[in-house]
Amino acid sequence: MDSDPLLTEAEWQRTLAREQAKAAELFGRSEEEQRRLGYFHTLREICQQPGTWPCTGERLIASRDFLREDLKGIQSLALTGSGSSEYAGECVCLALKNELGIPAESVSGGALLMYGGKALPPGRPGLLVSLARSGDSPESSGVVELLLGMEPQIRHVVVTCNEQGRLAKAGPDNKNIRVIALPSETLDKSLVMTSSFTNLLLAVRFIGMLERPEKYRTLCARLSQITSDLLLSKFDMLAKIAAADFRRVVFLGSGSRFAASREAALKMLELTAGRVTTVCETYLGFRHGPMSCAHDDTVIVCLLSCDRTIRAYELDLLRELDRKRLGSFKVIVGENIPDSAVRDRDTAIECPGLGELGEDDDCTVHVVVAQLLAFFRCLEEGLLPDSPSAEGIINRVVEKFPLHAPS
């Protein structure tokens, strides 16, 4: 069934509940009961994503002239963030490097704090794009403040979901900082990043498409449609997979999907409070040691490329896993998944339309699959998705820590 990404949030929830029994169960409870069971925010924030992407796209298109000025004459590009924000930048880095024709790297906020400009790609003037959900973590503002003093030839663009955050408020006071605040609904209230992750990813993706705004608008719309259809058809299936008997999950991906697999592994780890062990690796890298972790209690989630050559390498690895009888079962996510790759216990998550998105832009859909797997597993573990770290080991915003002056 096709879906309309312009539905209101309530209409979209009702549509999803009509199509999927698990959605009917979860959304059918009162808001008070959903809050008591601890999933009100996380479920809503995962499911709202297709409707938020076109809005974020328009916000970035409206910033086109400013971004064009920031990009003028730059010799290098760095994307930075911490945790999920770093992985969002990593998802688009390869595409931006090829589209802009300059060195482009994803660099963690922690690396910049410790190594300063030495961690940045060579080439000045350069542009540093900081991605942040809240903009209130120690790294977020600390990195910008450090580099403003150490690297005067670095320009700064901040992309954040929180226009009231510390990082966003630094912009008006400094002409070297440009701030782009995303729509308020992208500021997740849950502990884990879901809507904020995909919207930050999609926002930064526009940097490589400044001169193709209509293509970018179409990309946002197609991602919205494909993911809406995925939710309408696979919601129950993903809940069933998450209820299986496993204690560890391997996420495999190539290119942008390897970055997506890093985010996928983090989501499962965070939402299960570490009860489910996770590993992320490339298909070719998995042979070089990490394959030893695939035991009988292991699910192997395979984010499959639509590129013919890349897929050939990936399918070779899947055949090897089958031949060696590794893992409990595979979950294969992609389009036109060959029957030969699916064993008896395996599940194929078909996502029609991924191929037309291309190698650079399908990872957003893969991430949503991983978010739902982690969400449902959290419920199976008896945890609260909105706050799975009951003992406060991790928090929505990383707690303050000392920032040390570079030597």
Image: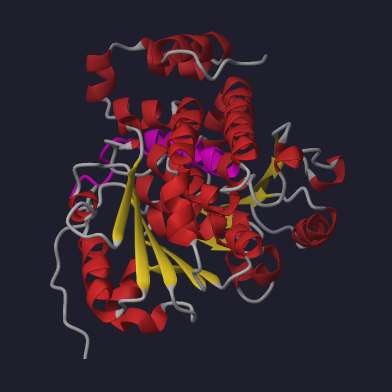
Give how far across and how far down residue 166 sits, in percent.
Answer: 17, 52
Quadrant of the rendered image containing residue 147: bottom left
Q: Quick check: is 384 in the magenta stretch?
A: yes
Q: Position of residue 377 (x, y in %)?
A: 44, 38
Q: Is residue 203 above or below residue 349?
A: below
Asked if one can make out residue 375 in the rendered structure from this viewpoint, the answer is: yes
What residue do we see at 31% from left, 47% from top? 133
Residue at far bottom of view: 407
Question: In the depicted view, which residue is nearer to us: 204 or 338?
Answer: 204
Relative height, residue 41 to residue 325 (above, below): above
Task: Locate residue 99 relative to residue 152 in the image: left or right.
Answer: right
Residue 397 shown left or right of residue 349 in the figure: left
Q: Would residue 85 be counted in the magenta stretch?
A: no
Quarter holding residue 36: top left
Residue 349 in the image: state x and y as whole percent: 68, 35
Q: How is the image coloured?
A: secondary structure
> Which residue is drawn at the image coordinates 24% and 42% (left, top)?
163
Residue 294 visible in the displayed image: no
Q: Which residue occupies the foreground of this view, 374 or 78?
A: 78
Nearer to the camera, 246 or 390: 390
The N terminus lies in quadrant: top right
Q: Give the residues drawn in magenta, as a range.
A: 366-393
Q: Position of residue 360 (x, y in %)?
A: 66, 52
For the point 50% across and 72% down, the residue is 76
Q: Is residue 112 left or right of residue 396?
A: right
Q: Residue at x 27, y 15 (%)?
A: 31
Number of marks in the rendered image: 0
Q: Quadrant of the C terminus?
A: bottom left
